[in-house]
Image (cartoon, rainbow, N blue to C red):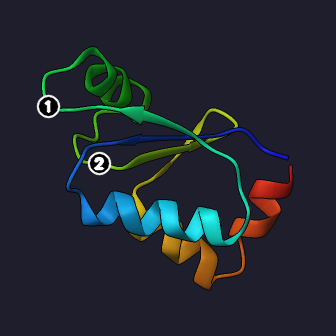
C-alpha cells in the first residue's frame, strides 16, 4: 500500500472531501495540520512546488495536488493504481 500524506487545516471543506474519499477507500493516511504560517504549511509549499492551498496530497512522496486533483484521478480510474503501489 502506498504512503499517503495530506496537509490540512481545520474548517476546510476541500480537506474534508479528500479525507472522506480516502476513508471510503479504506486508505490509511498521515494527516499533517498545516495552518497558515506554520512550518508544516511551509513544508507543504516547498514539497508541492509552490502550491499554497490545502489540502496538499502526496502519494509515496509525489505531490498529486489537492482535492480537485484527487477527485479527477478517481474519476479517471487512476487513483487506485497509485494507492496500490
Q: Is 73 rendered above or below residue 2?
A: below
Q: Residue 22: x and y, percent?
A: 61, 62
Q: Secondary structure at mark 2?
A: loop
Q: Residue 32: x and y, percent?
A: 43, 32
- In the rendered structure, the answer to whether residue 4 lies left or right of residue 70 reads right
Residue farthest to the bottom, as pictured: 75
Q: Secondary structure at mark 1?
A: loop
The residue located at (24%, 57%) in the rendering is 12
Kindly report the distance in space between the C-alpha atoms of the residues bearing marks 2 and 1. Answer: 10 Å
Q: Residue 38: x and y, percent?
A: 21, 20
Mark 2 = which residue? 54
Residue farthest to the top, as pictured: 39
The one of 60 and 25 positioned closer to us in this rendering: 25
| Image quarter of residue 76 | bottom right
Q: Residue 69: x and y, percent?
A: 46, 66
Q: How many marks?
A: 2
The disc, 2 or 1, on the residue closer to the chain's N-terminal end is 1
Mark 1 = which residue? 36
- In the rendered structure, the answer to whether residue 6 lies left or right of residue 44 reads right
Residue farthest to the left, as pictured: 37
| Image quarter of residue 40 | top left
Amino acid at each position: 500500500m502506498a504512503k499517503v500524506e495530506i496537509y490540512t487545516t481545520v474548517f476546510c471543506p476541500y480537506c474534508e472531501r479528500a479525507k472522506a474519499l480516502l476513508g471510503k477507500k479504506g486508505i490509511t493516511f498521515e494527516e499533517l495540520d498545516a495552518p497558515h504560517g506554520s512550518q508544516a504549511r511551509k513544508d507543504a509549499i516547498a514539497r508541492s512546488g509552490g502550491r499554497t492551498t490545502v489540502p496538499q496530497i502526496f502519494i509515496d512522496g509525489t505531490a498529486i495536488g489537492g482535492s480537485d486533483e484527487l477527485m479527477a484521478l478517481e474519476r479517471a480510474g487512476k487513483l487506485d493504481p497509485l494507492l496500490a503501489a
